[in-house]
Amino acid sequence: MSIELTKKLPTPAEIKEEFPLTQRIISAKQKRDAMIRQVLTGESDKFLVIIGPCSADNEDAVCDYTNRLARVQEEVADRLILIPRIYTNKPRTTGEGYKGIVHQPDPLKKPDLLHGLIAVRKIFMRSIEETGLTPADEMLYPENWRYIDDLLSYVAIGARSVENQQHRLVASGMDVPVGMKNPTSGDISVMLNSVVAAQHGHSFIYRNWEAHTHGNPLTHTILRGAVNKHGNAIPNYHYEDLQLLLEKYNERNLENPATIVDANHSNSNKQFREQIRIVKEVLHSRRHSADIARLIKGVMVESYIEEGNQKIGPHHIYGKSITDPCLGWEDSRKLIHTIAELC
């Protein structure tokens, strides 16, 4: 066989039984899910800030970061809902490099998928228990969703996954907001087609079961910039881009038209400090147009304790990204307060 099956993993039910939720976690998720839902449906005029490391590589550092975020959340609670990015799967363009804590709970050791699944559940549970903030993650592997569906309040579908049928169908069965990123080509129609698919119900095979879904009305778009045929970044956060997306939304019969602007990736050409300027421009566009203000529900920012990034190795700097570069904590804290002032 070309695929060697080496270890049968526990089912989601078995993992959940071994690591059950506390009442504090259950209550926090119920409360936060309702608050975030109201933003997506337009019932609340609060603004979402999905912020945190490019990849969650270390439980202590990530929980240190989310505890800091929780203190800032108290200061801006009247305007903002902060959703910590705890991204446990890392898509790799070439398949090489660190693929996230689900693959390698310890980046210096070999992949261990069983302990990876456990590490993912434990980092989410610890962060919520300590902060009351329920996190966001990217759904890179749709079959893994049920291991953590009781912990996440926001899910992103990445630029390389947004055209995939299984991602769209699984998203249609989620009860939390799912953001569909534009593909790396930047084609808006692909992103919107994905939203249409996920907002409708489907029947399909999932984890050896015949599955049926009823559609997810909270599915929406995420603008993350694009790349042209020469590999040059093409941003799509400018006012004209937002106006075009609004027009395309209006041409389709979609529930809860909404978008999140990802300030990094191809929008910043991975120049992480540019995220500050980009977020400010997005907020200016919201202030300029009431229609665009209703469309843009939040921003996504890559941020960690220490700014920049580092290579994986023995001389590890605590709280510094081992994948894409991130804003440091002090700049992130200031940016959050700026967003609260400008919303």
Image: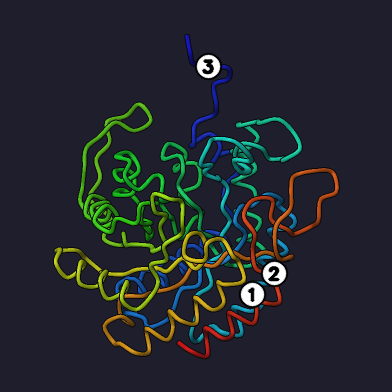
How far is mark 2 from mark 3, CA to CA? 41 Å
User: Is 227 located above or below residue 101 in the figure?
Assistant: below
Query: Are the residues flagged by discs 1 and 2 in contact, CB closer than 8 Å?
Result: yes
- The disc placed on residue 39 is none
Packing grade of label 3 (10 A; few <14, some 14-19, many >=20) is few
Residue in the foreground of this view, choosing between 338 and 31: 338
Q: Amino acid at mark 3?
A: Leu
Question: In the displayed image of the protein, which residue is found farthest to the front?
Answer: 230
Packing grade of label 1 (10 A; few <14, some 14-19, many >=20) is many
Q: Badge 1 is on which residue?
A: 332
Q: The C terminus appears in which quarter of the rendering?
A: bottom left
Question: Image point 65% across, 43% down: which residue?
Answer: 119
Q: Amino acid at mark 2?
A: Gly
- Color scheme of the displayed model: rainbow
- The disc placed on residue 328 is 2
- N-terminal of the two: label 3 or label 1? 3
Q: Badge 3 is on which residue?
A: 5
Question: Image point 71% across, 52% down: which residue?
Answer: 59
**Front disc: 3 or 1:** 1
